[in-house]
Image (cartoon, grey):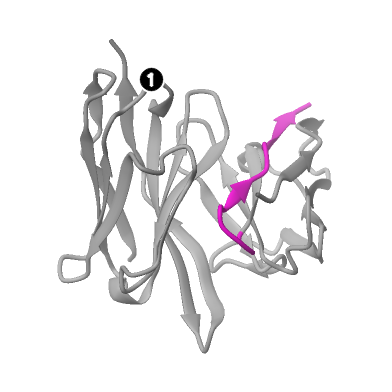
């Protein structure tokens, strides 16, 4: 199975900051990487797939990059609605696997 | 508008069964793979099972293999998860998601929509 390691597991940031979350795969997954946002008590929301393709309706403040084993999610100009937990997921092979999540908190 | 509505969750005892349903609307259901993902209380997301568009290709997580069965009815735009021999560790919110659509072997849409989830609690 492909292990997905996210870092950091949590971070504190202020409104207006730019933050970067890293996701590392235990083996080459090409560009088969998705990012999701989840707020407490809510279903996940899809942000990005194919490492850098924004889902429809997702603002351009979210951006993804990377390929192979190393990927990043960058969120620019943080707003109160962006404080949430973010997960990466690889879909290069089954079983699909998620990272452990990154909790983005308000400083 | 795409809608995914899960149902069938509840409180059961260890060893019992439940059948989850996910009713889909707003898209061409038969063109998409469908997936179940679960989230135990206070934990992260865990993939459970996927079924491809025709229902022939199916995958399961090792943790549920042999106990859970995924199926779909393309005439009713619904995907199911039959859960047998439930364990305490199966307690979670279960989400269904619209998985991939492929064209010419290339993924052109992926995990664009999720349902709101249905709670499964296994406890004696």
Quarter of the image for the C terminus of chain B: give it. top left
Report x, y in % for residue A38: 55, 41
Q: Residue at x 48, y 63 (%)?
A: B112
Quarter of the image for the N terminus of chain B: give it. bottom left
Helix, strand or loop under label 1: helix
Report x, y in % for residue A87: 64, 45
Extreme-bottom residue of the structure: B104
Q: Quadrant of residue A6?
A: top right
Report x, y in % for residue B102: 49, 79
* Residue B114, placed above or below residue B95: below
User: Visible in this render: residue B28?
Assistant: no
Extreme-front residue of the structure: B66
> In the figure, is residue A41 to the left or right of B17?
right
Q: Circle 1 is placed at which residue position?
A: B88
Q: Residue at x 54, y 39 (%)?
A: B45
Membership of B119 in magenta stretch: no
> In the figure, is residue B8 to the left or right of B89?
left
* Residue A47, placed above or below residue B61: below
The chain under label 1 reads B
> In the figure, is residue B55 to the left or right of A40?
left
Q: Residue at x 75, y 61 (%)?
A: A64
Report x, y in % for residue B56: 33, 70
> In the figure, is residue A95 to the left or right of B79?
right
Membership of A93 in magenta stretch: yes
Magenta stretch, residue numbers = A91-107
Query: Could you say which is closer to the camera, residue A93 or residue A101?
Result: A93
Q: Residues within 10 Å of mark 1 (few under 14, many from 20)?
A: some
């Amino acid at each position: 199975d492909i292990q997905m390691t996210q870092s950091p597991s949590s971070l504190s940031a202020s409104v207006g900051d730019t933050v970067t979350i890293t996701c590392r795969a235990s083996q080459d997954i090409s560009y088969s990487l998705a990012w999701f946002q989840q707020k407490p008590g809510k279903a996940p929301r899809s942000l990005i797939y194919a490492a850098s393709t924004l889902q429809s309706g997702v603002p351009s403040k979210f951006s993804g990059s990377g390929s192979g084993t190393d990927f990043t999610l960058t969120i620019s100009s943080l707003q109160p609605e962006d404080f949430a937990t973010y997960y990466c997921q690889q879909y290069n092979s089954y079983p699909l696997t998620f990272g452990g999540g990154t909790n983005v908190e308000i400083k | 508008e795409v809608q995914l509505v899960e149902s069938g969750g509840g409180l059961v005892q260890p060893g019992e069964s439940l059948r989850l349903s996910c009713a889909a609307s707003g898209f061409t259901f038969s063109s998409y793979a469908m997936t179940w993902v679960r989230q135990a209380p206070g934990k992260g997301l865990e993939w459970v099972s996927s079924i491809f568009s025709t229902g022939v290709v199916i995958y399961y997580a090792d943790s549920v293999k042999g106990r859970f069965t995924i199926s779909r009815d393309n005439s009713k735009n619904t995907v199911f998860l039959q859960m047998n021999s439930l364990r305490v560790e199966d307690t979670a919110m279960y989400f269904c998601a619209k998985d991939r659509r492929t064209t010419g072997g290339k993924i052109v849409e992926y995990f664009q929509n999720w349902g709101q989830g249905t709670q499964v609690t296994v406890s004696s």
